[in-house]
Image (spheres, rainbow, N blue to C red):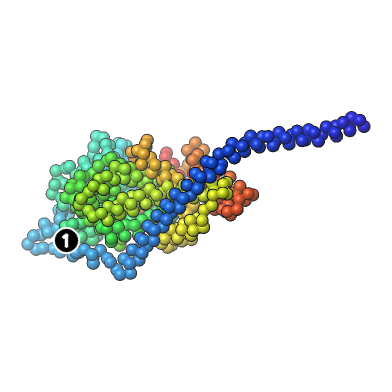
Amino acid sequence: MAERISSEALLPTETAFEGTINDMSFQVISLPWDAIRAPLVVPLLRLSVFLCLIMSLMLFVERVYMGIVISFVKLFGRKPEKRFKWEPMKDDIELGNSVYPMVLIQIPMYNEKEVYQLSIGAACGLSWPSDRIIIQVLDDSTDPMIKDLVEMECQRWASKGINIKYEIRDNRNGYKAGALKEGLKRSYVKQCDFVAIFDADFQPEPDFLWRTVPFLLHNPNIALVQARWKFVNANECFLTRMQEMSLDYHFTVEQEVGSSTYAFFGFNGTAGVWRIAALNEAGGWKDRTTVEDMDLAVRASLKGWKFLYLGDLKVKNELPSSLKAYRYQQHRWSCGPANLLRKMIMEIITNKKVTAWKKVHVIYSFFFVRKVVAHINTFVFYCIVLPATVLVPEVEVPKWGSVYIPSIITLLNAVGTPRSLHLLVYWILFENVMAMHRTKGTIIGLLEASRVNEWIVTEKLGDASKPKLAAKTPKKPRFWIGERVLMWELGVGAYLFICGIYDIFFGKNQYFIFLFLQAIAFCIVGFGFVGTHVSSF
């Protein structure tokens, strides 16, 4: 009995001792947090919220402005034929075919085994006088077998009377820009007035030149006529549907507004026709960034040349259907513009051939808001700062900044693809995930850090045009840890999940539904369960 009493007497003491240890451990952890929370974390988070709200307002104003302009364009029918002179080409009995300008077609290629026949065939099928067109295949392929196949395809079309040239280099200096630049140095190019450029997966309709060249012929101040892209594999998978929603806004709104108001927009690098004289006056192709097409467009615009976008003229092409290919493409598309802004900002400011208003448009709207602010704000605000306010309740985000403005921006972005409105929530979550990758690319471009000039050609599968063949292609299993796991995405997903758990038990913002959905999206991408995964065998 005495022993039992002694044990019972000691038990509370031991329990109290353990409780004291736990309290001490908690204090050891919480004391440093409490020490930096009020003087450091709260002010920094409030500053971050303020900056993100400013960027959100910038994006909001930009989207509303473009929405108003595009509404007026559609309402009053400001078609290209009404803004610029356009007359159909007509035969001349006396002059014969010489009445038609000489057109060069450039097709840059790099190991395009799946699509080389489609692109060469489409270019050779263009309806234009055969003695007034030259097809130039610029093959930078490193695979000898593919080079032989491309050369044989060119010879096959040449045997049919097509004026087609197969050009190769002994290096890949400058990548695509280098190939295009070398192609223009050929002696037979001197007789050409215009050059149309098609990437290897692009398939123009036969009447492409009949619809574009007259604008250049009758309007000597136009340097570029750009056509819209039509995605042949948009329904292939979830990844391609998401890309279609993003790119349709670019073509339906951004380029249409730029063409209608400033006669300027960024050249898309393909499906466009250039006046060779304008291209040369602008300094030709340069490989100083990974967006050589945008670089050329900005330089030509600073020389006073105008651009025209034809939204009704569509050229079929293929979207990257694998996550790996899409990530490489997005790195190039986000890093390149930021780096180009760094290189050209002073040149734009000091230029004397364009108006101050156009300079503001190029620097602020075209570059800063769309190419820098849009990426950084999307990731930092919605995936870092907003979740952090759950852990630091002293910092509040107004409803107009966290709900109303993002909702309006999202709806305005979605107007380009009405058929995918039911996928809007998925698109938001996916775009937030990709914004992390784009933000990293933007920062690399602005700082000119490593990978700033990384150029990896976007893989093309040609599956949309060969469904039966694609179905027979052997595929790897859906999940390979060594190849598929993306640690940055999984890390952000874990952070969002923790914030969501904290919001349920201790928070007051009710953000946990968004946080959990966004965390799931990051994890799905992080484990590579997006897009197709075709075998490399």
Q: Quadrant of residue 81?
A: bottom left
In what quadrant of the picture does the N terminus appear? top right
Q: Position of residue 199 (x, y in %)?
A: 29, 48
Locate residue 525 relative to residue 328 in the image: left or right: right
Q: Is residue 454 visible?
A: no
Q: Nearer the viewer, residue 330 or 504?
A: 504
Q: Position of residue 117 (x, y in %)?
A: 30, 48
Locate residue 213 relative to residue 361 in the image: left or right: left
In what quadrant of the picture does the C terminus appear? top left
* Label 1 crowd (10 A; few <14 / some 14-19 / many >=20): few
Q: Which residue does the image show at 74% across and 34% down from the upper left?
A: 18
Q: Which residue does the image show at 32% across and 57% down from the upper left?
A: 255
Q: Quadrant of residue 84?
A: bottom left
Q: Which residue is mark 1?
A: 218
In the rendered view, would you say 252 is above or below 481?
below
Q: Nearer the viewer, residue 18 or 525?
A: 18
User: Label 1 amino acid?
Assistant: His
Q: Nearer the viewer, residue 19 or 441?
A: 19
In the rendered view, would you say 71 is above or below 521?
below
Q: Secondary structure at mark 1?
A: helix
Q: Position of residue 169 (x, y in %)?
A: 23, 37
Q: Nearer the viewer, residue 126 or 315?
A: 315
Single out the residue that lies furthest toward the right. Answer: 1
